[in-house]
Amino acid sequence: MFSRQLLGLALVAAGGLTVFLFLWLPFLGAPLAAAWAGLALLLLANRYPQALLIGLVAVAPFNYGKPFAGASIKLSELIALAMLALILLRLAAGEVERWARLRRGWAPVAAMGVLAVLAFATAAPHPNLFNARYELWNYIACAYAILFFRPRHWPQLVGAFVALAGVEAAAALVLYFGFGVTGTSFFSDEAAVRLIRYTAEDIESFAGGMFRLSGTMGHKNLLAAFYVLILPVVVIQMFRRYRPYWLLAIIPGLVVVGLSDSMTGWGAILLIVVLGLLHLRRFDYLALATLLILPLAGAAVYRFGDTIFYRIEQLLSGEEGWGTVSSRFEILEVTLRLLGDYTWSGIGRNNFTAYGETYYGHGHNLYLMKMVEMGVPAGLAFILFILAAIGRAWRPILFEARRLGRQQQYYRALGLWLGCVGFLAMNLFDYNYAHFSLGPLFMMNIGVLLAVAYDFDGERHVGGRDCALSHAAG
């Protein structure tokens, strides 16, 4: 009892000291407060490992950065550090399940380790070396999901997707229709939340559409990419087990994507719908419901899709529209020039503007940008890893649908996989992967899919061995 009282007094004293330092000596108090928050998060995650996965989803639209040592440290980075700490602690403790999962998923984990080393090695000769840490956070999120995700975590993960879809949609719509703000930016180096205001004349001047909503993500394509990652699994789950209140998140989310004026987002959603229909099983009422809804969706687009048709017409006609299209070709030209000049070594991260002698911040193609940043060999290795991970996650969806369905995982995995494919399709014309919220979220989803695939293979192998032993004994 006495020791508990001393512990309580020590915690109170430490908390008071932290508050004092935070108010009067912030350069000492801020790191101390972050350390306490990290410790609390780590203790929570030790009990509930899925908390870090849900936390990564929760901070995605509100990934505030705090200046520290010349950099802007984001909330997602603290979560990634907690993930790494928990991975190391559990492996060091010799936890049987963690080592078993590592043995099953050693290939992607080892590949990500090599890619992380290559990211830092190729960035070392160039400025902004510290920005290569974002690649490390992405790989940590994926590895954590591989090692810790379990099928029983699906309801909580999907619930987080639903909640964030609704919250972000509400924020985007209230900002625009309530305050006349098209969006906010959380990625200022000064860690200030900047308001983005585009008037109708501003948007018309650069053929930006009609609304150009960006919500709290800072850019219309980032907002659309966020919904492309999370909406497919939410929509499919809503149809599988009808929950009308989920429509309060789904419908506003679709409206926000429509008002974002993101053509890459619209194209990704169209691709997701087509691939989703191809994966629906025969005699499934979900397929019937989808086929009934498609005409209604087409009628809704025709009746309320003025922003979509206006955006397409705007790009295909007028000087401003052709200027927007031609700028993409200018960016591609700069990208290819850098690819030729730095074929083997790359230019590191966030150096596109300086090395390309341009005012564009980055190329608009994930796959070319990875080769520009890391060099062609390392960039190709990254591309092969992503494609291999997507293919590995697709295999049980494609060939073991019945068994996955019995485990209530088929449509959940399908929705998550469709979101990842749509995100990769968007990145043919964007570089959303580089965003400090979307990169970890995408890689976490890949890790969840790989965890499902490896667990499924493990169960199948165990079941096959048990059947063989039973047959031999008989």
Image (tube, helix red, strand yellow):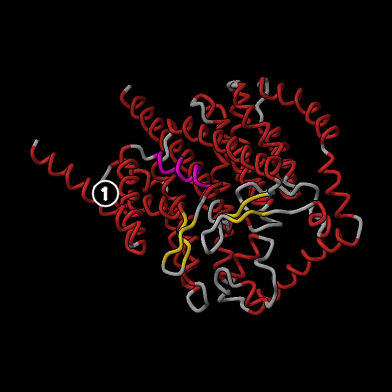
According to the picture, the residue beneath numbered tag 1 turns out to be: 15
Q: Residue 156, percent across and down?
A: 46, 32
Q: Is residue 73 left or right of residue 368?
A: left
> Which residue is at the front of the view, 160 or 346?
160
> Which residue is at the front of the view, 133 or 67?
67
Q: Is residue 162 magenta?
A: no
Q: Residue 286, percent across and down?
A: 66, 23
Give the quadrant of the C terminus. Answer: top left
Name the dominant secondary structure of the magenta segment. Answer: helix
Q: Is residue 375 above or below residue 147?
A: below
Q: Is residue 304 above or below residue 186?
A: above
- Residue drawn at x 47%, y 38% as measured from the top left: 452
- Residue drawn at x 44%, y 55% as measured from the top left: 77
Q: Quadrant of residue 430?
A: bottom right
Q: Quadrant of residue 168?
A: top right
Q: Is residue 38 left or right of residue 424?
A: left
For this orientation, the residue located farthest to the left is 2
> Which residue is at the front of the view, 194 or 410?
194
Q: Residues within 10 Å of mark 1 (few under 14, many from 20)?
A: some
Q: Residue 194, percent across and down?
A: 60, 56
- Which residues are the magenta region? 50-60
Tell me the kind of residue under disc 1: Gly
For this orientation, the residue located farthest to the front is 24
Q: Residue 335, percent across and down?
A: 69, 70
Q: Is residue 56 magenta?
A: yes
Q: Is residue 352 left or right of residue 452?
A: right
Give the quadrant of the N terminus. Answer: top left
Q: Secondary structure at mark 1?
A: helix
- Residue drawn at x 47%, y 75% as measured from the top left: 124
- Residue drawn at x 64%, y 58% as measured from the top left: 431
